[in-house]
Image (cartoon, grey):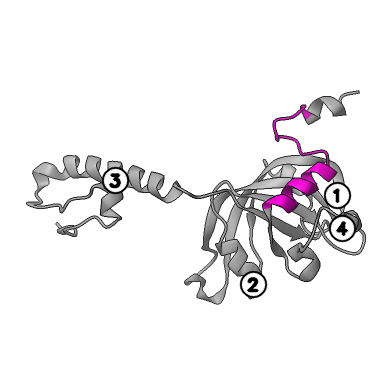
Amino acid sequence: FIRPPNFVFGPASMLNLVPIKNWSICNINDTRKRTKAVNKRREIYLKMGKTKRYWLLKTEPSEWSWSDQEANNGISKWDGVKNKQAQKNLKSMALSDLCFFYHSGAKSRCVVGVVEVTREWYSDGDGDDNGGEGAVDVRAVGEMRRFVDLKEMKGDKGIKDFVLFRQPRLSVVPVEEDVWKRVCELGDGFCGDGKEDCESSDES
C-alpha cells in the first residue's frame, strides 16, 4: 500500500481544496469521490476565461487530402511536423479549437474545409516529446461551401497581416478571429456551421 500525497494541488481559492489527512483503506472510496469532484472543478477552472482559438493546417493533397480526412471517419492524427515554430503552434492548440484544412502544393493552394481539435498535443512514439515528435488529433467538421484560394485571400482588403502571407512555409499557422470570419465569408461558410445543410445541395 502506497500512501498518497497529503495535498491535492490546484488554485485553492477556486477549488476550495483541503489537505487529505488520516488516510486509510476505509476512506478510499470517499477520497476517490472527492478527487473526481476536484478534477471536475479544475476542468471548469481551466476553461474559465478561455476563448476558442483558430488555426490553419497545411497538407499536400497527394499525401493527405480532405477526402482522406472524411474517409477516415473524420478523425486523424496530425503528426510529422518538424518545424519548431509549427510544433509550438501545435502545442498551443486546445480542445475544440477550429482549424482551416488547407491544401498546399503547386496545383492547389486553398482552404477546403474545417477540422476541430479533439486531443491536445501528445508524445508520438518512443521517449518524451523533447525531440519534437508529437501530434494532435483533429476531427472533420465540414467542407467549405466554396473553396477559398490563396490568391483570393491575398487580394481581399478585409484580410490583413495574415501569418500565412508572412510565413508561407509554415505548416501550422495561427489565424486571428477577424481573418477567420472573413475567410468563412469568402467561402460562404462551411458544413456544420449552423447554416443551411450542405448535404442538401449535393442531392440531384
Residue 168 visible in the picture = no
Q: Which mark is residue 85?
A: 2
Asked if the stretch drawn in magenta spans residue 195, the answer is: yes
Using residue 44 as the reference point, say whether residue 103 is left or right of it: right
Rendered residue at 51%/75% (across/down): 130
Using residue 111 as the reference point, say whether residue 78 is left or right of it: left
Pointer 2 or 1: first along the chain: 2
Residue with the mark numbered 1: 148
Query: Circle 2: is it few (<14), some (14-19), or many (20+) Cα within 10 Å?
Result: some
Q: Is residue 84 above or below residue 46?
A: below
Report which quarter residue 152 is drawn in: bottom right
For the residues bearing labels 2 and 3, Cβ distance under 8 angstroms = no
Residue type indicated by callout 1:
Val
Q: Which mark is residue 150?
A: 4
Residue with the mark numbered 3: 38
Rendered residue at 83%/61% (across/down): 104
Residue type indicated by callout 3:
Val
Between the C-alphas of marks 2 and 3, the distance is 35 Å
Q: Position of residue 79 (x, y in %)?
A: 64, 62
Between the C-alphas of marks 3 and 4, the distance is 47 Å
Residue 55 visible in the picture = yes
Residue type indicated by callout 2:
Gln
Rendered residue at 14%/57% (across/down): 1
Pointer 3 or 4: first along the chain: 3
Query: Circle 1: is it few (<14), some (14-19), or many (20+) Cα within 10 Å?
Result: many
For the residues bearing labels 1 and 3, Cβ distance under 8 angstroms = no
Residue range of the region highlighted in magenta in the rendering: 177-197
Closest to the observer, 41 or 199: 41
